[in-house]
């Protein structure tokens, strides 16, 4: 079983920055492909970013390219989502996800086996 604990959400003005963290436990971290998803009120959960097991490959949804950066620290068993130039439309609950024994999982939510509890990000205009 993999446990994922997100932190770092909050309220920020448009144009500001936040860094989300997701601490993983229960499996060898480099064996977990990781991703970030988000869900805004009244909308379906959507893919934000993904990173491969050792961090060599990343992928982003078009709406966050150039503004968000996903990374992972293998020594700390933590994946990060650095969010810059935030917009009101980035407001959502952000979820960390892990795919067990996978080098890569990509943008489909059903490729992931474990999910965190979510952290709220609110961007005011």
Image (tube, grey):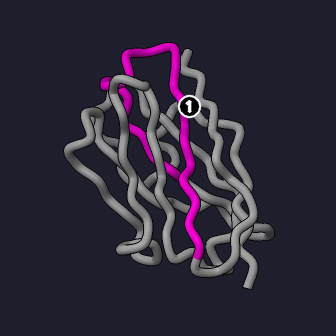
Prevailing secondary structure of the magenta residues: strand
For the record, the magenta segment spans 16-36
In the rendered structure, the answer to whether residue 67 lies left or right of residue 9 reads: left
Q: Residue furthest right?
A: 42
| Element assignment for label 1 | strand
In the image shown, does 108 or 86 lie closer to the viewer? 86
In the image shown, does 51 or 42 lie closer to the viewer? 51
Residue in the image at 34% along x and 46% along y: 51
Question: Does residue 18 lie above or below 5 as drawn?
Answer: below
Magenta-drawn stretch contains 112: no
In the image shown, does 89 or 97 lie closer to the viewer? 89
Q: Residue furthest left?
A: 56
x and y percent of residue 47 in the render? 50, 59
x and y percent of residue 115 in the render? 60, 36
Question: Does residue 45 lie above or below 14 as drawn?
Answer: above
Disc 1 crowd, CA 10 A, few/some/many (<14, 14-19, 20+): some
Q: What is the number of callouts on the image?
A: 1
In the image shown, does 30 or 76 lie closer to the viewer? 76
x and y percent of residue 69 in the render? 39, 59
Question: Does residue 19 lie above or below 77 as drawn?
Answer: below
In the rendered structure, the answer to whether residue 96 lies left or right of residue 99 reads: right
Q: Which residue is mark 1?
A: 114
Quadrant position of the C terminus in the picture = bottom right
Q: Quadrant of residue 61?
A: bottom left
Question: Does residue 11 lie above or below 113 as drawn?
Answer: below
Residue in the image at 26% along x and 41% along y: 55
Magenta-drawn stretch contains 31: yes
x and y percent of residue 90 in the render? 62, 72
């Amino acid at each position: 079983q993999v446990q994922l604990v997100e932190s770092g959400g909050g309220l920020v003005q448009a144009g500001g920055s936040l860094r989300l963290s997701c601490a993983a436990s229960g499996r060898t971290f480099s064996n977990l492909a990781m991703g970030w998803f988000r869900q805004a009120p009244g909308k379906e959960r959507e893919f934000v970013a993904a990173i491969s097991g050792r961090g060599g490959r990343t992928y982003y949804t078009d709406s966050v390219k150039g503004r968000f950066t996903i990374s992972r620290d293998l020594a700390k068993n933590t994946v990060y989502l650095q969010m810059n130039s935030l917009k009101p439309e980035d407001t959502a609950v952000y979820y960390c996800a892990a795919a067990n024994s996978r080098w890569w999982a990509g943008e489909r939510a059903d490729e992931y086996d474990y999910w965190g509890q979510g952290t709220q990000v609110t961007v005011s205009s």
